[in-house]
Amino acid sequence: MTRLLGRSLPALALTCALTAYAADLPADKVAVGARAPAFRIKTADGKSIDLAELTARGPVLLRLTCGCSGCDKELAYFQQIHDAYKAQGLTSLFVFKEPDAKVAKYAGDKKLNMLYAVDEQGESWKVFQTKTMPTNFLIDKGGKILAIAAGCDPSGLLANRVSEKAAKAVGTDPVNVKNKVEQGKDKK
């Protein structure tokens, strides 16, 4: 009996260690090719947004962002992405990590014409397993993650890559959002 128990203890210890390690891993890793996690959030006016309902209708560009100067500079590019592909079914949802009142003023000043919500506690970043702000998730109709673009790029190059993938998701030619924003600046 002692001999049997002695051989079983190392195996039991290894099993317990692997189980503990597995418990620390996210159930479903948020990655390109994986299904987007279940996600619901309320807008400032109390409207509930369910990511699964949005992706049932078409692709979604989810942007976890803030109102910092870098994100603010990028906003024009992502507004261009929204404008370029919304007629083909793309829904854009911005989730800000700022207080409601600040975001309401920001949205008014910037004339945001897409869905947006506030998550001051950062729960959205936990659900999507990211610490980087901003992070953009392009999710196809049906809920599979097509692209993840993390980090701030005020030059517009990252937004152009997202634009190309969004165009492919909606089945149209890509729009060079960097050029569109630059052309808009020249007209002012």
Image (tube, rainbow, N blue to C red):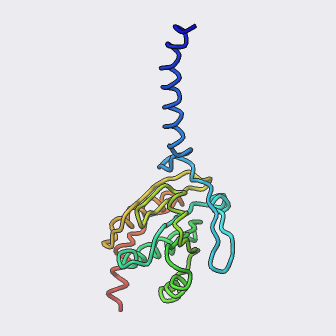
Q: Can you give x and y, in whole percent of width and height, for residue 113 in the image?
A: 55, 80
Question: Furthest-bottom residue in view?
Answer: 188
Using the rendered view, name the quadrant where residue 184 is placed.
bottom left
- Measured from the top left, where is residue 58 in percent x and y? 61, 61
Q: Position of residue 138 (x, y in %)?
A: 50, 59
Find residue 31 and report its horizontal and vertical position in percent. Answer: 48, 49
Q: In this view, does 30 lie above or below 94?
A: above
Q: In this view, does 156 lie to the left or right of 38?
A: left
Point 49% across, 37% down: residue: 21
The quadrant of the rendering that contains the N terminus is top right
Most foreground residue, 86 or 49: 49
Q: Depth check: 110 or 96 in front?
A: 96
Report the front residue among 35 and 166: 35
User: Position of 173 compared to 86: left or right?
Assistant: left
Examine the image and state in which quarter residue 42 appears: bottom right
Q: Check the picture and name the quadrant holding the C terminus.
A: bottom left
What residue do we see at 52% from left, 88% from top? 105
Q: Nearer the viewer, residue 16 or 98?
A: 16
How many discs appear?
Answer: 0
For image coordinates 52% across by 37% down, the residue present is 22
Q: Residue at x 52, y 26 (%)?
A: 15
